[in-house]
Image (cartoon, grey):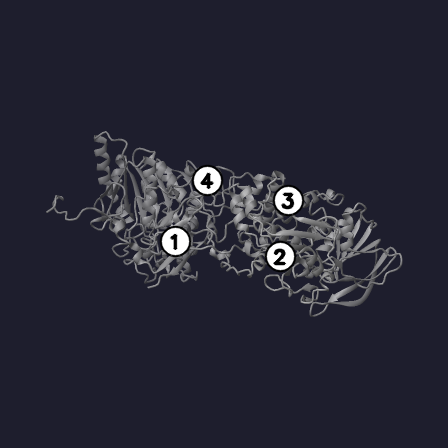
Amino acid sequence: MTTQPVRFYQVGSFAVGNRLLDPDQRTVQADRSRSNALTSGHRACQGCGEALGARYVLDAAMRATGGRLVAVNATGCLEVFTTPYPETSWQVPWLHSLFGNAAAVATGVAAALAVQGRDDVRVVAQAGDGGTVDIGFGCLSGMFERDDDVLFVCYDNEAYMNTGVQRSAATPPAARTATTEAVGPEPGNPFGQGKDLPTLAMAHGVRYVATATVAELHDLEAKVERAMGVRGARYLHVLVPCPLGWGSDPSDTIRVARTAKETGLFPVYEAEGGTVTSVSPIRRRVPVTEYLRLQGRFRHVVGADGTVHRPDIVERLQQMADATVERLGLDRPAFGEGGPAGTGSPRTGEAVGTGNPRTGGPAGEGATP
Amino acid sequence: MTDLPFGISLDVGTSLANKTGSWRVERPVYVDRLPPCNDACPAGENVQRWLYHAEAGHYEQAWRALVEDNPLPAVMGRVCYRPCEGACNRAQLDEAVGINAVERFLGDEALARGWSFEAATRPSGRRVLVVGAGPAGLAATYHLRRLGHAVTLVDGAERPGGMMRYGIPKFRLDRGVLDGEVDRILALGVDLQLGTPVTDLPAAMRDGGFDAAFLAVGAQLAHRAYIPAGDSARVLDAVSFLRDVEGADPPRLGRRVLVYGGGDTAMDAARTARRLGATDAVVVYRRTRERMPAHDVEVQEAAEEGVCMSWLSTIAGIEDGKAVLEEMELDADGFPQPTGRFHDVAADAVVLALGQDTDLSLLATVPDVTVAGRSVQVDGTLMTGHPGVFAGGDIVGPERTVTTAAGAGKRAARAIDAWLAGGTLPQRDRHPLATFDALETWYYADAPKAHRPVLELARRTSTFDEVVGGLDEGTALFEARRCMSCGNCFECDNCFGMCPDNAVIKLEPGQRYRFDYDYCKGCGICVSECPCGAIVMVPEEL
């Protein structure tokens, strides 16, 4: 008779915890004694992806560093909803910077610690997409270029949310924001604009660059742990759905993030020194309409029931997803899921920068190292 | 007034002072829903529960949870037609969980390791007569004993087991397994009286001083049909045929055997005939495959073993060495109608498997009991019109399977227990069903079903060895872990880990979780991302 080895634990590695695994193999979030770096009582909206992402990242970083961690936080939603004077939700040493200089402040903290000979305390800088790709990019680029010992985390909710959902350079094409209304022949954010920050970080030759979503906790925590094991500049880009700005149901936050990855619109990968070293393959690929229909910001493109109002825009977005899937090989079988160990990843020596996955711009328009 | 730095007028406080639970208009609540397997099980097994223990490799705990409802898991794991798997939500994802295979593994494991039932807590002092040692009678005996009642179990046959022994062929149910599970029930302390059919129930109850009785005598009388047959024609009924195969001198049928009927018994008879040396075993049925009452698995296994089917046919007459078949056709209402077209087929013997009837002569002197058609009429607690006399199994119907009978035995035992205590069995509210759309199946690992090994075909037509084997430990564990735990929390930590407001409190292992409504904003992520659908949102009272 045929037998199958028992390497299967009912929920595999998809759920947060697993009673059948040893505790040290479970996620940080499954641990009752997790640090809860971002604790209850914060004023984030219902179903906030950023609150979730920040707790995931900092709790994992706290475990990786034995609790010796300083966080520097740019202005933005994350700062506003956690620290209305005189309250704080942070259970970690935490500094608030200006909107644009979180990277520089973090550099300073790291330098000050170095002067004191404190190499045991590590520094994390965090910002939203506005504080990263727009306002903070100059400081961030400098931090990358100097290889300062900081993990910079961007919680990307693809617009300026707490000020009223204005477009940022991370807003995807066709998305409605307060400054890119869904009117005219090309409604929403224009195609061909915006920045792909992970690619820009790779172009700086940053030691470790990774993307992740709040929907894949094991993956996200592994990347944080990996990043904290590296000295020098590191960059982590986490997709955090925003029910308010995206017009998605608060209960759909995880689903939206998961669908972003499963469509290929948001690729999840790791890169070292400017080269993609591994990708998180798509498990059950779905068309982009499955992602768009969950969000009010694309309602002019696809209805909530999946009715396509603008097939031309869907087509362009689908082409973007297809190009990203093709470029990074996201449709290969995953490790431990339906294929022998190691197939599909890691992929080394991959040329990157041949197209801008964020903006739908043609190949060559993106950052090429 | 203060020693705070310049410009600072308040001490640093924690956001825990901000009770964001006041934002909420709906609150999440943990629920248990009824998994479809449990819902479908005629024996009322808590399938999800015992699979939960099996998943962790706690097989004895799993087995003990299983036998809370059904004392015959090794038998069930062989002969049950597994309505649980037909209802399993996982079938909509890849394939149904092999519940029956895991049940068999647990049953076999229990026999191999000698696990025994826990004896009754303390005797009740009441005495119950159980008539019929088939699955219903044995199950009732088991449950009554565990409830502390003294049981006298009587049966007309020489050995206990009823149709499990005298109706189901060995190649589907190994007799060592049957004996093992029956003996384990008897070890609870049962006054077993074999070879003593009860002919007069009131007399038996009076003489034995019984407080209640459970009748489960089964349906052992073969239906007959008038078929003109020559003197030398060899015609048997399937019930006696299968019973005689159990004896020391199995009947001889010849090489060409016709079996008349379309139920499971017809399949068993045809498959048994193949094993007794028939080269041609043909099932003759007057309707079509779709209308055949036999279960798919039986028909398929019979066909694999070379049993042929002659649809839309009746046997019009039997002579020495041949039978006359008449072709039928279905009318507009789906009933078979004769066509007048006849043809001969060679037949050394004809086995009639046309259904079974009940022998209820022991009730002749019990005037309050109503018998309608072939069935004893009972109320919701399985009590007949005569107070204290309960009935179940094939004599009540309408489903006539081992599993249904085992379930009837359990229900009757609990009802008798309640009746003896002067009450009636309270109706338990059933949880709402855990349907597939309540699940978030993303979280379940991809895992196709582990199939049970099947005996080589050559051996299936020459021996009475069991056709379907069991799973080894690793494969059974794998199969158990395919369970999605529909509607029942299995502590995956998704709610605990995915709450943006840390408003889920994780309790000790096995104790699940609790919501912290001081901070829960009611976003509903926990509900969306609960794999098994064990959380619902309910409106807050405003």
Return the residue nearer the eye: B160 or A165.
B160
Picture coordinates of residue B174 (x, y %)? 69, 44
Q: Amino acid at mark 2?
A: Ala
Picture coordinates of residue A313 (x, y %)? 39, 57
Picture coordinates of residue A192 (x, y %)? 33, 52
Q: Nearer the viewer, mark 2 or mark 4?
A: 2
| Circle on res. B408 | 2
Asked if residue A20 lies left or right of residue B422, the reply is: left
- Position of residue B366 relative to residue A163, above or below, is below
Q: Amino acid at mark 1?
A: Ile
Mark earlier in primary sequence (3, 1): 3
Return the residue nearer the eye: A48 or A75.
A48
Q: CA distance from mark 4 to mark 3?
A: 39 Å
Q: Amino acid at mark 4?
A: Leu
Do labels 2 and 1 touch, CB within 8 Å?
no
**Number of numbered markers:** 4
- Position of residue A101 relative to residue B433, above or below, is above
SS at mark 3 in the image: loop
Query: Do badges 3 and 1 share one subunit?
Result: yes
| Circle on res. B187 | 3
Q: CA distance from mark 1 to mark 4?
A: 24 Å
* Neighbourhood count class around disc 2 (C-alpha, 10 Å): few under 14, some 14–19, many 20 upward: many
| Circle on res. B525 | 1
* Neighbourhood count class around disc 4 (C-alpha, 10 Å): few under 14, some 14–19, many 20 upward: few
SS at mark 4 in the image: loop
Residue hosting label 4: A21
